Image (tube, grey):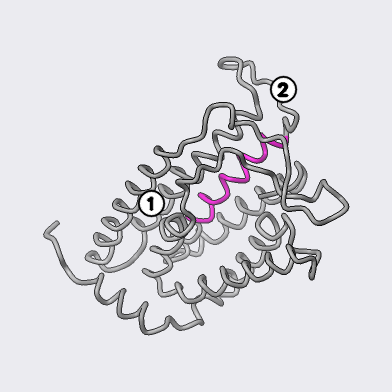
Amino acid sequence: MCYNLPVTILSLSIHTILSIFIYKRGGYNKSIAIILLGIGTMQLSELFIHMDYKANKFFKFPYKTNINRFGSILGRFSLDVIQPIFSLFAILICPINKNLKVNLCLIWFVLFMIKLLLVIMTFPEDDKFKTTTKNNCNLKNKSTCLLDWPWKAKGNIWLIYIILVVGLVALAIDQLTFWILFGVFHIILAHLQDQEIIRFWNASGSCFWGPILAYIFIILKIPEKIPNVFIFKNLKTLLSKKFINI
């Protein structure tokens, strides 16, 4: 999440431009680019939130709608629906074994249904779709704090989200080990930031520096050079078998 409008615009631009660049490289890169574009929709939602941080501005077409509320609802659906659907499309266009593709799609469907059920059971009240506060801030400059998402339902289990959005495709293209390590790296830096040991991985960690690092690694083909651990290799081999006739 980003902490102000200019940084949000910059992050969204990075997502869009570099995703297109990666997509044009073809092969597995198309699937990676689709996932990154999907994740970038969260920056689009925060763009609207920051445009109306005090929740007192409105769209007038096609009907009168509060801009902040629109961005908050878009953020909720980005997490629950939009990003997972982008990931499904990434699986469908991925140049992998047909059996593996079918099995991954089935796993995606099961996890997606579980995620939706959990979210529906804990869906926020309508008055929660208003993002006008910030949290997780140990810095004197409050403008660099994280946006507080009151609409982030308890049903949004992050492990299921990560598997749906990144994990299935990463497994298919033999990059799961790298992205797990990258995730651990992010968690460690975020913890050090919370403990005030470092000062640069605040909201920028997920909004700016994290995506920048990810794109640099992808462009340099670093994920392809990190071998998968044997557990993931065996799992991919298992899922490459034919279980149903399609």
Place of residue 211 in the rendered image (x, y in percent of width and height, measured from the top left): 64, 60
Q: Nearer the viewer, mark 2 or mark 1?
A: 2
Residue at image coords 38%, 43%:
116
Identify the mark at residue 89; answer none if there is no mark: 1
Comparing 24 with 136, the one in front is 136
Place of residue 30 in the rendered image (x, y in percent of width and height, measured from the top left): 45, 60
**Seen in the image, is 57 located left or right of residue 160?**
right
Tell me the distance, in whole angstroms, between the alpha carbons under discs 2 and 1. 35 Å
Question: Would you place residue 49 above or below residue 62 in this image?
Answer: below
Q: Which amino acid, mark 2? A: Lys
Asked if residue 44 is among those painted magenta in the image, a careful observer would answer: yes
Residue at image coords 27%, 68%:
97
Comparing 144 with 21, the one in front is 144
Q: Which amino acid, mark 1? A: Phe
Question: Would you place residue 114 above or below residue 23 in this image?
Answer: above
Residue at image coords 77%, 44%:
6
Q: Quadrant of residue 168?
A: bottom left
Instruction: Kindly state the secondary structure of the residue where label 2 is placed.
Output: loop
Place of residue 176 in the rendered image (x, y in percent of width and height, measured from the top left): 45, 72
- Magenta highlight range: 35-50
**Seen in the image, is 241 located left or right of residue 96?**
left
**Seen in the image, is 152 located left or right of residue 80?**
right
Magenta stretch, main secondary structure class: helix
Instruction: Kindly state the secondary structure of the residue where label 1 is placed.
Output: helix
Please identify the quadrant where the C terminus is shown: bottom left
Comparing 207 with 145, the one in front is 145
Residue at image coords 54%, 61%:
22
Asked if residue 183 is among those painted magenta in the image, a careful observer would answer: no
* Residue to which mark 2 is pinned: 57
**Seen in the image, is 191 located left or right of residue 75?**
right
